[in-house]
Image (cartoon, helix red, strand yellow):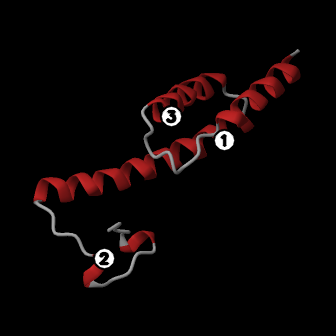
Amino acid sequence: MSYKPKVKGGANDIENGQTLCTEHNLLKRHYSQAEAGKKYFINMYEKAVVNSDMRIIRSYKSVFNVHDEYDINGHIPSPNGKWLISIYKIYKIAS
């Protein structure tokens, strides 16, 4: 059976419940924080693109590459396609 957390639209009933030890319950909570972190990085990346901040763009690109390489939160798409378009626009504006 596949469980879906209530905060992600899952049912609040016994069939959707999970009995976990403390360690695994905390790990489950950690993944939600990782998802929030990836969304934060995407938001900051988009602001860096708007401001043509190459240092931040490169740094977050590295973070997205790690997420993609290890399939971390793969259900949240990394803005890798936007990366190439953004760099092209930045260099075109600068030249």
Compare marks 2 and 1 and give the one earlier in the sequence: 2
Residue 69, image x, y percentages: 47, 29
Query: Which residue is disc 2 drawn over?
Result: 16
Query: Which residue is disc 1 drawn over?
Result: 46
User: CA–CA distance between discs 1 and 3?
Assistant: 18 Å
Residue 6 vertical placement versus 93 (above, below): below
Q: Write the residue at 61% across / 38% down.
A: 45
Residue 55, image x, y percentages: 60, 22
Residue 90 vertical placement versus 35 (above, below): above
At mark 3, the secondary structure is helix
At mark 2, the secondary structure is helix
User: CA–CA distance between discs 2 and 3?
Assistant: 29 Å
Query: Which residue is disc 3 drawn over?
Result: 68
* Mark 2 nearby-residue class (10 Å; few <14, some 14–19, many ≥20): some
User: CA–CA distance between discs 2 and 1?
Assistant: 36 Å
Q: Amino acid at mark 2?
A: Asn
* Mark 3 nearby-residue class (10 Å; few <14, some 14–19, many ≥20): some
Q: Nearer the viewer, residue 94 or 19?
A: 19
Is 54 situated left or right of 11 in this image?
right
Residue 19 vertical placement versus 32 (above, below): below
Residue 67, image x, y percentages: 47, 35
At mark 1, the secondary structure is helix
**The C terminus is located in which quarter?**
top right
Residue 57, image x, y percentages: 62, 28
Compare marks 2 and 3 and give the one earlier in the sequence: 2
Q: Write the residue at 45% across / 38% down.
A: 71
Q: Amino acid at mark 1?
A: Glu
Compare marks 1 and 3 and give the one earlier in the sequence: 1
The outermost residue toward the left is: 21
Residue 91: which quarter of the image? top right
